[in-house]
Image (cartoon, rainbow, N blue to C red):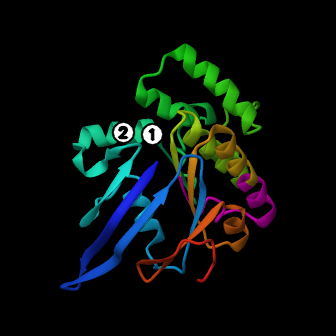
């Protein structure tokens, strides 16, 4: 479902080139739930942004569902992301001036889905994330766990093939984080979506089908062993 081959990424810093990722290659199968772990600064979030088409590698190529990202023009790449990828962030990234319903529906609005279909899917996803009575609330009226459930609904409502989650429980307490994490893994399994989740948590990693480890910009293991 996703293939990355010899990914290399660097940026200029104080007159020198700072290498973040070097020769990273990986494959994700449809329906896999994979954890990406490593110490701070190892390149996890950078790799996630590259796989999601937000940033462009300096060398190497990335293909999702048979489409090579580097061969897509910017407007086509933007549309491809909207259709095929769902993003979940540690900071929730909800739009504060939009209600819960409006935040969740944003991907469908951008894709031009009909109002009737939007209403149908909204009702379904509000029930799935257990927030049917909060549709008209604003993000600042919600708890952290509720905000992240809204973010999950927004990431999945357009039925993407790939879900990229960057420390999705990092801002939550342990109990709330466990509830949100169980929901995310359960939904990914039910819909056969490929889930790649960046985490510092061994508890999170142990729930995954497979663990990838980044160390100093290199993928050092893919056998499930956590060595970070």
Q: Is residue 152 visible?
A: yes
The answer to whether 182 is drawn above or below residue 36 in the figure is above
Q: Is residue 175 left or right of residue 22?
A: right
Q: Which mark is residue 84?
A: 1
Residue 133 picture location, percent across and down:
76, 31
Q: Is residue 95 left or right of residue 172?
A: left
Q: Which residue is mark 2?
A: 80
Q: Is residue 163 left or right of residue 147?
A: left
Residue 79 picture location, percent across and down:
34, 36
Q: Quadrant of the C terminus?
A: bottom right
Q: Are marks 1 and 2 in contact (CB under 8 Å)?
A: yes
Q: Is residue 135 visible?
A: no
Please tell me which residue is depicted at 60% across the width and 35% down the height of the picture.
99
Please tell me which residue is depicted at 75% across the width and 65% down the height of the picture.
173
Distance from label 1 to label 2 (Cα)? Answer: 6 Å
Please tell me which residue is depicted at 54% across the width and 31% down the height of the picture.
105
Q: Which mark is residue 17?
A: none
The answer to whether 45 is drawn above or below residue 104 in the figure is below
Local SS, label 2: helix
The answer to whether 194 is drawn above or below residue 58 in the figure is above
What is the magenta range?
Answer: 164-181
Q: Is residue 177 left or right of residue 29?
A: right
Residue 93 picture location, percent across and down:
53, 51
Q: Residues within 10 Å of mark 2 (few under 14, many from 20)?
A: some
Residue 194 picture location, percent across and down:
56, 49
């Amino acid at each position: 479902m996703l293939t990355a081959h010899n990914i290399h990424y660097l940026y200029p810093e104080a007159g020198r080139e700072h290498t973040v990722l070097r020769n990273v290659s990986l494959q994700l199968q449809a329906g896999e739930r994979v954890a990406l772990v490593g110490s701070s600064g190892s390149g996890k979030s950078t790799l996630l942004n590259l796989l999601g088409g937000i940033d462009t590698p300096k060398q190497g190529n990335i293909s999702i569902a048979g489409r090579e990202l580097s061969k897509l023009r910017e407007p086509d790449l933007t549309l491809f992301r909207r259709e095929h990828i769902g993003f979940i962030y540690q900071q929730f990234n909800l739009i504060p001036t939009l209600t819960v319903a409006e935040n969740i529906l944003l991907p469908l609005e951008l894709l031009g889905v009909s109002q009737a279909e939007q209403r149908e899917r909204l009702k379904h996803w509000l029930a799935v994330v257990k927030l049917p009575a909060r549709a008209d609330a604003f993000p600042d009226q919600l708890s952290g766990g509720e905000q992240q459930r809204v973010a999950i609904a927004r990431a999945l409502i357009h039925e993407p093939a790939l879900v990229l989650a960057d420390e999705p429980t990092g801002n939550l307490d342990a109990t709330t984080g466990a509830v949100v994490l169980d929901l995310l893994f359960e939904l990914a399994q039910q819909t056969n979506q490929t889930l790649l989740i960046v985490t510092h948590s061994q508890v999170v990693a142990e729930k995954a089908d497979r663990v990838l480890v980044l160390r100093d910009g290199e993928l050092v293991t893919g056998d499930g062993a956590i060595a970070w």
